[in-house]
Image (cartoon, helix red, strand yellow):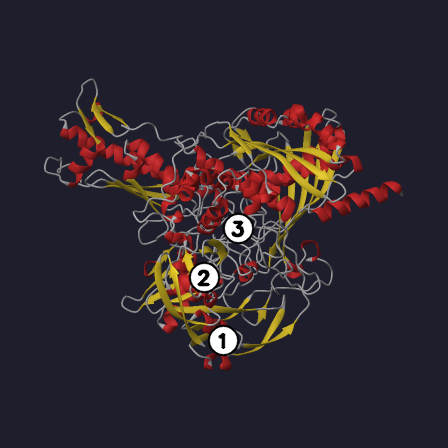
Amino acid sequence: MNAPLIGARIERKEDYRFLTGAGQYTDDVTLPGQTHAVFVRSPHAHATLKSIDKSKALKAPGVLAVFTGEDLKVGGLPCGWLITDVNGQPMKEPVHPSLAQGKVRHVGDQVAVVIAETLDQAQDAAGLVEVDYGVLPSVTSTDKARAKGAPQLHEIAPDNTCYVWAIGDKAACDAAFSKAAHVTKLDLVNNRLIPNAIEPRAANGMYSRADDSYTLYVASQNPHVERLLMTAFVLGLPEHKVRVVAPDVGGGFGSKIYLYAEDVVVTWASKQINRPVKWTCERSESFVSDAHGRDHVTTVELAMDKDGKFLGMRVKTTANVGAYLSTFASCVPTILYATLLAGQYTTPVIHCEVTAVFTNTVPVDAYRGAGRPEATYVVERVVEQAAREMKLDPAEIRRRNFIKTFPYQTPVALMYDTGDYEATLSAAIKMADVAGFPARRKASEAKGKLRGLGYAAYIEACGIAPSNIAGALGARAGLFEAGEVRMHPTGSCTVFTGSHSHGQGHETTFAQVVADRLGLPIESVDIVHGDTSKILFGMGTYGSRSIAVGGTAIYKALDKIIAKGKKIAAHLMEAAETDIEYDRGVFKVAGTDKQKTIGEVSFAAYVPHNYPLDKLEPGLNENAFYDPTNFTFPAGSYVCEVEIDPDTGVTKIEKFTAVDDFGNIINPMIVEGQVHGGLTQGIGQALLEGCKYDPESGQLITGSYMDYTMPRADDVPNYQVDTRVTACTHNPLGVKGCGEAGAIGAPAALMNAITDALQVYGINDLPMPASPQTVWKTIQNAKQKKAA
Amino acid sequence: MSIKVSMTVNGKPVSAQVEERTLLVTLIREELRLTGTHVGCDTAQCGACTVHMNGKAVKSCSMVAMQAEGANIVTIEGIAAADGTLHPMQAAFKENHGLQCGFCTPGMVMNAIDLAKGNPNLTETEIREGLEGNLCRCTGYHNIVKSIAAGAKAMAK
């Protein structure tokens, strides 16, 4: 038997191939007879398509086909979540065509596809497709979408409104506010982000006449969902005739969850030309075609009694969903956002109203955190501001309001199963040396600098989700996960999972879970994911659900392996099944020294010479579907310390401390890596990244790495991270998930630190990203105001 | 117009017919099928395509194949020992969890080896500044910095 593998820092099994260039990403797949596709995209934010002339392009060297919306008459790209508005009406779902039908609605909207023998030929010919556009006025900004006279995107959505949705008891909330000793109010913008996984999206579709089947290689986080949506809703193909393979995928962060137009087009086109069709996104193209994230405009009010105890919270948010509804666009600013507004606090009544608006921008969907960073930003910014106004220590106001007993039913639908918010907060305070902050602030001031410290105590709902609850809330799919454990005759093991790894390290983490339970060396366990032809089913990876849902499905399959193994072992050792005890790979007859290993039991199952064939099938291969009974609730406390140069506006992060509770941890090395990555994306949002559209033309101004500021190595600090554990109560591993936490908690902590530093000027808010120019300007404005 | 280019790639002489506009990275990926070198952007910003040309780290997306005529090119596939043993910098990335999705990794490793050559005691600041031309969206750089510091020390041994 091995040393325990759960909780061990095991180097990753997948690293060797990535480090030697042997990874296989979608663009690395080249099929016999490969052709190449290039999309013609709208250069306008809003226009009618008056005519498309493809004759010149068709005559260009190497061109095999040019297709437009006239050729591709299939279903629209579906939205997977129905939101019902405040009047009981379904959200407005305008058709989302894979190739434009009569109109384009954002810069980058796909108009035509050119397919040629080589990529160069396809690119050259794409420039020859002549499109006559009737340019229309456009609207890109969230808060102007419903303005009087604003250009209308879709006939079925008056005032560009997708839905107005609400949660919580408004009357009770208003009553709480009427009794408040103090109300703190903030107007906040959660800036639009562009996900930017470093591997651009790619898709390679192949049709086989031999059996009328399709194979699609695609950079996807959830190949089965991709197949389901594409076959059932768009192309009307039988599901069993379509295989979707998501091989190595170079980061997703949400942006590769969705069914995209390009995936549909290359699959469809491969039959039309009877050749495989590959499309690989260029980076500048990904800026105008990958789903964006965030983009909320919010007003929040927090009512308190005289001691800073929260009495109620009122939130009004406008969320920009872009030009069309992407796959999960509708649930992000509602179900994944407003339900988290209780945060870690006992706020007894909360009301939130969300208006989702269409604009002439790229569709907006889930991006790392998806709704929960937006909720955390609202809660933690207003709580910090409330502490300032109530003249309370920001840690103290949080402590006064922490939820302390579990399970806890929030006023916004969720039931937290467990947590210990004081534990993470006090650990973070200690690790960040908050006690030494006043001295460090003095030292900064002596150099003419400003120093600030900010907290964020976040919570997230992960392990998405119980299918019945999700269904009641509008989900149009189940949210279980599938796993299969296949013992081989000689004792090694292959595990198939519907979760998909695109950097998270499942091949190691899941192997640790299996090897630990089966008492096998980790080298004897391989994890297979990302191929609908190998894996029985899968809902994929998003919402930090892989270990909590996918890992549990595997765990349940292991239960079945062990249960069957007990029967086999009982037969082999001529004992009663009830006398067999199992511990990490060893079946023992209780009270004796008789035992059989999992390897011996596997061998007997596949070479059943001495086997209870009258009672038991041979073989040792089991699968399980797991549908969770609740979300998981990772939570933590972050402390950020910044130094600002008031003369230049440059903010330097001096310290960033994160103490998280992810429940039990399988591989701390991988978990820390997830936190580091999430923090950097959160810091990116607060300091560097901001998607900007030109309000007049609707052009994307931040359309390349020259214009959109990605965090680089010298923009971020070394992180101090640690964990505290309250085990999840409703899955057998006690795990909660860790993939998004950093991105959820970091922006509020950082902006609280910056506004703390700027309190000398009376500055309580400034927009993200807090670039040097923004900080400097905000300081100048405050100084002028003071002087006036 | 098609032209012939010749160079050494990972120790082997290669030649290919390419167009004048063919990028070095396209030659490496499409003609030579060495797909470990990646393309992550179109503005020479991400560094995923970094290879060694005559011993120096270069971005293979920002030069045409013709410019490498006669050059000695090493790609990520040419870094480990012939028996598959990882180069000390590759090993350091593995030991320090300096990679997640693996897409930026080849470029990171190629740049790191160049950075560490003759610099066994790279400081954190030197490493962070030296990574200015390489983007990673997964790791937050924390463990890449650790990996390169450890790899630089190991390379000097």
Query: Residue at left 75%, top 37%?
Result: A758
Circle 3 residues within 10 Å: few <14, some 14–19, many ≥20: many
What is the secondary structure assignment of the residue under circle 3?
Answer: loop
Report the mark closest to the observer, 1 or 2.
2
Report x, y in % for residue A310. Answer: 68, 30
Confirm whether residue A175 shows in the render: no
Same-subunit check for callouts 3 and 1: no
Q: Which residue is mark 1?
A: A125
Circle 1 residues within 10 Å: few <14, some 14–19, many ≥20: many
In the rendered view of the protein, which quadrant contains the N terminus of chain B? bottom left
Query: Residue at left 18%, top 30%?
Result: A569
Whichever of callouts 3 and 2 sits on the residue coming sooner in the sequence is: 2
Residues under numbered marks 3 and 1 in contact, where contact means CB atoms less than 8 Å apart: no
- The three-letter amino acid code for the residue at tag 1 is Ala
For this view, does A582 lie left or right of residue B141? left
Q: Which residue is mark 2?
A: B25
Same-subunit check for callouts 3 and 2: yes
Q: Which chain is disc 1 placed on? A: A
Q: Gap between marks 3 and 2, in whole Å? A: 16 Å
Report x, y in % for residue A382. Answer: 69, 36
Q: Which chain is disc 3 placed on? A: B
Q: Gap between marks 3 and 1, in whole Å? A: 32 Å
Query: Residue at left 38%, top 69%?
Result: B16
Q: Gap between marks 1 and 2, in whole Å? A: 22 Å
- The three-letter amino acid code for the residue at tag 2 is Val
Q: Is residue A59 above or below residue B87?
A: below
Circle 2 residues within 10 Å: few <14, some 14–19, many ≥20: many
* Residue furthest front in the image: B118
What is the secondary structure assignment of the residue under circle 1?
Answer: helix
- The three-letter amino acid code for the residue at tag 3 is Asn
* Dot label at residue B134: 3
